Amino acid sequence: MYKTTGFISFLFRRVSGMALVFYLFMHIWVIGSATGGAEAFDARMATVQAPLFRLLEVALLTAVVYHGFDGIRLLIVHWFKVTEYRKSLFYAMFVLFILVSIVGGVPLLLFALEGN
Amino acid sequence: MAKNGQTQNVTIRVQRFNPDVDAKPYLASYEIEATADTTLLDALEQIKATLDGSLTFRRSCRHAICGSCAMNVNGRNMLVCNRRVNALLDRRGRVTIRPLPYLPIIKDLVVDRTSFWEQYLRVKPWLIPPENGAAPAGEYRVLPAEVEALKMAETCIMCGACYSACQVVAMNKQYIGPHALLKAFLRVLDPRDAAPAERLEIVGGDDGVFRCHTIFNCIDACPKGLDPTFAIETLRKLAQKRLAFAAERVERQKSLGTGRDA
Amino acid sequence: MRVFVMQRLTAVALVLFLTLHMIVVHYPPGHLDFSRVMERLANPVWKVIDILFLLAVLIHALTGAYAVLMDVERVTPYKRMLVGTAVLLGLIAFAYGTATILAFNTF
């Protein structure tokens, strides 16, 4: 393994990407199979709002936020000549990712711990 | 750290592998005396001359221009001839030298670079001149700005450090690789080259620039400070407007070989 | 190249769509119920946005999965099979998802 910031970003991008593909198809199926009216939908929502799913939701958020910010970084590398600042760019992206994950994740986590 | 002239004992760990004897590679430790000026290559030579004559490695020019001695030192690819032992000691005062990763090992620090050269030939690394039938009337005059754009890719010494550091190469040997894509960049942007469309088709294909994952290992590894990632990003943009770019080149070449400026 | 362009274009679209999706659907957290979804999807503009979002995310996911698999040397001989599977899977998921979005006004 050739461990550099670039490799780490690539690894996280791959893992989060594959997790999100899996999630996407689950998501389409979960919502799609609950279109039988208000009761069916709310019952399905109640199932997926069990504490375990709440924690998974936090993981989902971090995966989405990481993948998104990393993607924006790649777009920047594509459109501007910034390879010289590749490490700073990665760290900047990572800090943003952590911040947004905390801002978005902590309320979710609190909510998960409190229950309803 | 040893000052000029003073010697210091250092441990060099070298990955050894003799396919006739060993089942798999192992690390061997050697104690050598190093001064502040001892390069990694000097250290290997010293081991070979005084400690173990069977140690096998490639080297030629000893001043970072032949591209023979790229190896993996403390986990990073570099030339061993232009790096000092002194500057590369890890926390325990050792240096660890391994062959270039992800390539088949022939013996000790020598790797099989067949795939490296095969991929290199795929991009047609030579210049394809305009087919005018007749010899040009005058010299090919290239504008300073055009030369400037090529500068970044010219000084490659084909050492294989980037190729072997590339994570995509590690996963899939069908990928053309940063070294060859850098050369493709050099040819595609050269106003004297008459085949940018053909080149962009090769590098824009399944095994080309679009397989790069922008990991930057090639830049980190390059001992000449070149930027294959920028070359790849540029080729990505050009591949998307391949025919328009080729048409521009045809226009440009009308004033080429006349001995006059464009 | 086509895969790459599809992936990059949908990536830009997703940055916008996902931000919107997160804010509109999931904020504040834990208040997702049927009436809220119905209220929003009663507006045909939201239906169109959601269908476009679905299309973009499916293209992005499938091209991404394709790229991941094609990076494995042993998988590359099965390229055509992979493309076929991705297109089929995409069409099925898109039809199913669109039906879901459209279903939210028939009650």
Image: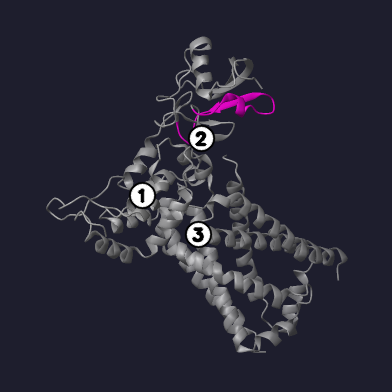
Residue at image mark 3: A78
Residue B153: x %, y % from top left: 40, 46
Give the residue at x 31% y 45%. B125
Q: Residues within 10 Å of mark 1 (few under 14, many from 20)?
A: many
* Residue C13 vertical placement versus B121 (above, below): below
Tag 3 secondary structure = helix
Residue at image mark 2: B101
User: For residue B186, which numbered disc appears in the image?
Assistant: 1
Determine the chain carrying the residue at label 3. Answer: A
Whether the magenta-drawn stretch holds residue B93 is answered as yes
Which segment did they paint magenta?
B82-104
* Residue C31 vertical placement versus B103 (above, below): below
Choose between C43 and B36: the one closer to the eye: B36
**Marks 3 and 1, how far apart in space?**
18 Å
Determine the chain carrying the residue at label 2. Answer: B
* Residue B228 vertical placement versus A108 (above, below): above
Give the residue at x 42% y 47%. B152
Choose between C95 and B211: the one closer to the eye: B211
